[in-house]
Image: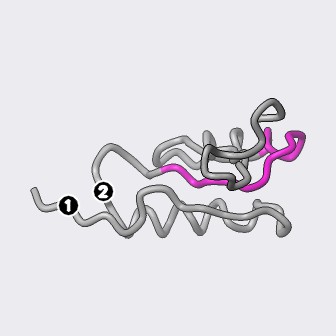
Amino acid sequence: MKKNPCSPYGLSRHYYGIIQGGSFRDLREQVQNSYYSKTVDGIAIGGESHWFDMPKTCEIIDWVRPMLPEDKIRYTMGVGLTRKI
């Protein structure tokens, strides 16, 4: 990042930590706690599972949101996807 702080288009790059852990609250808490000691521009919340489940995604966001620092950008990965099986 420091070597090439801008994209080929001249836009600045940002470093995001991703809170993963599937539908396991304890795993997500462990991952989230590690980011307090890291310098990141924002925090992404990874998807809940292999299959899309919006109610579970909302539940996971509710678990994680109170633990996130207020001064970091937040990004939810995979939200908005519609899958027909």
Q: Which residue is mark 2?
A: 52
Are discs 1 and 2 less than 8 Å apart at CB?
yes
Q: Give the magenta part as a residue range.
A: 33-46
Mark 2 lies on a secondary structure that is loop
What percent of the width, then of the height, locates residue 50? 32, 43
How crowded is the residue under tag 2: few (<14 C-alpha within 10 Å), some, or many (20+)? some
Task: Choose top left, top right, bottom left or bottom right for residue 26.
Answer: top right
Q: Which residue is mark 1?
A: 83
Q: Amino acid at mark 2?
A: Phe
How crowded is the residue under tag 1: few (<14 C-alpha within 10 Å), some, or many (20+)? few
Answer above or below: position of 7 versus 56: above
Would you say residue 78 sits in the magenta stretch? no
Residue at screen point 10% across, 56% down? 85
What percent of the width, then of the height, locates residue 43? 69, 54
Would you say residue 39 sits in the magenta stretch? yes
Residue at screen point 54% across, 61% down? 76
Residue at screen point 79% across, 62% down? 72
Residue at screen point 61% across, 39% down? 27
